[in-house]
């Protein structure tokens, strides 16, 4: 049970300082939930102080002052606005959009409370609530949050424990491709004149499959055409040959990964190879995704591609370079979405 602060026992001067500390924490980026928990106050009290602060600045937090002009947006209204922006998306409020903008929040406030605020007033309000504009992470709407949490807290820990018991190496695997017209980063150019990157007019790609472990090991293979059971079995056999003991490989639920042909091959290894599957629509749980990001953004995406063979050489070179940088690979497992597997 969370310990609550008895505000009634505080002197006026102490309560004033307490309120100011709460506002400063909100402004520094600490969430409302964390401030309430850390300082032992209710959400109602905190949003009430926020309303006071918005209405009269730091002086309005003085516990000796009573009454005064009633704010347009009181504590209850601020609490509702915060919960709406944090816990809902615009589509739930009958808007044809997926992201909250200041203009959209202003419209919600007008609809709900009949209060008109300018875009700049809303931006100031949101910052005072401890919110900031951020690029959102994309999640498939088909993703099951409960399955994701269960994978992190129950399923994968069991896999890791069994691997440790059997002396097996846990790999995370996936396929990817990169096109010849992929570029990343920025380049200097005159203001108002968009720079042009010269590249071949023909578009082509190279396909790759890789598996990485939390120990910093990477195994990879390039291939032509679409991934199929024979190509996957080829990669799996190479992975087994390069490993001293059993191999546990975590993949997504792609039909090829679950195909009968692949299943028969796995059974033929008599326990030396076992496959496990991530929850559906959850690529962010796979650390190997960081491998592809690193390879594309820091290597291939900054190069001029001269032809298919050149692109393939660059891809192989980038992955071989990673093989010599185990600490970089271990770092992929420290990514916030993948830290559960950093064992």
Image (spheres, grey):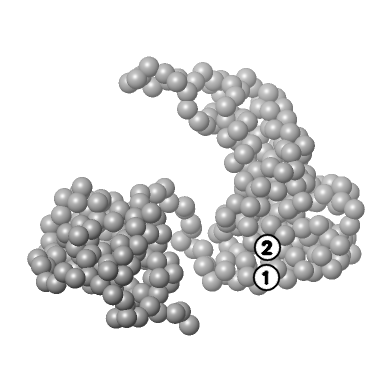
Left or right: where does residue 22 sit relative to residue 1? left
Q: Regarding mark 1 in the picture, which secondary structure is present there?
A: helix
| Residue visible at 63% across and 42% down in the picture | 292
Residue 134 is situated, as x and y percent measured from the top left of the image, at 39, 49
Residue 180 is situated, as x and y percent measured from the top left of the image, at 58, 28
Residue 319 is situated, as x and y percent measured from the top left of the image, at 72, 36
| Measured Cα–Cα span from mark 2 to mark 1 | 10 Å
Vertical comparison of 85 with 182: above or below: below
- Toward the viewer: 77 or 175? 77
Residue 36 is situated, as x and y percent measured from the top left of the image, at 39, 70
- Toward the viewer: 257 or 108? 108
Q: Regarding mark 2 in the picture, which secondary structure is present there?
A: strand
Give the mark nearer the N terminus: 2 vs 1.
1
View extreme (bottom): residue: 1
Could you say which disc has been placed on residue 155 in the image?
1
Q: Nearer the viewer, mark 2 or mark 1?
A: 1
| Residue visible at 51% across and 18% down in the picture | 198
Vertical comparison of 127 with 72: above or below: above
């Amino acid at each position: 049970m969370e310990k609550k602060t008895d505000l009634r026992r505080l002197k006026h001067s102490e309560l004033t300082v307490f309120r100011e500390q709460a506002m400063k924490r909100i402004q520094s980026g600490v969430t409302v939930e964390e401030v309430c928990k850390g300082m032992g106050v209710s959400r109602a009290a905190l949003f009430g102080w926020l309303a006071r602060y918005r209405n009269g600045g730091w002086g309005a937090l003085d516990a000796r002052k009573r009454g005064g002009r009633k704010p347009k947006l009181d504590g209850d209204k601020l609490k509702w606005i915060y919960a709406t922006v944090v816990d809902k998306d615009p589509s739930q409020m009958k808007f044809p959009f997926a992201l909250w903008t200041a203009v959209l929040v202003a419209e919600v406030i007008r609809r709900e409370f009949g209060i008109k605020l300018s875009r700049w007033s809303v931006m100031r309000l949101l910052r005072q609530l401890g919110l900031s504009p951020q690029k959102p992470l994309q999640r498939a709407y088909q993703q099951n949050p409960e399955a994701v949490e269960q994978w992190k807290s129950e399923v994968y820990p069991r896999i890791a424990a069994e691997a440790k018991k059997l002396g097996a190496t846990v790999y995370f695997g996936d396929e990817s491709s990169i096109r010849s017209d992929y570029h990343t980063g920025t380049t200097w150019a005159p203001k108002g004149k968009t720079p042009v990157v010269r590249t071949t007019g023909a578009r082509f790609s190279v396909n790759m499959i890789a598996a990485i472990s939390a120990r910093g090991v990477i195994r990879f293979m390039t291939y032509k055409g679409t991934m199929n059971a024979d190509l996957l079995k080829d990669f799996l056999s190479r992975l087994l040959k390069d490993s001293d003991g059993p191999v546990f490989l975590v993949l997504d639920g792609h039909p090829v990964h679950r195909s009968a042909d692949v299943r028969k091959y796995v059974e033929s290894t008599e326990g030396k190879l076992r496959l496990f599957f991530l929850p559906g629509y959850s690529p962010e749980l796979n650390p190997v995704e960081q491998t592809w990001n690193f390879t594309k953004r820091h290597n291939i995406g900054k190069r001029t591609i001269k032809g298919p063979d050149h692109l393939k050489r660059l891809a192989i070179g980038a992955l071989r370079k990673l093989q010599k940088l185990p600490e970089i690979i271990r770092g992929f497992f420290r990514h916030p979405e993948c830290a559960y597997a950093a064992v």
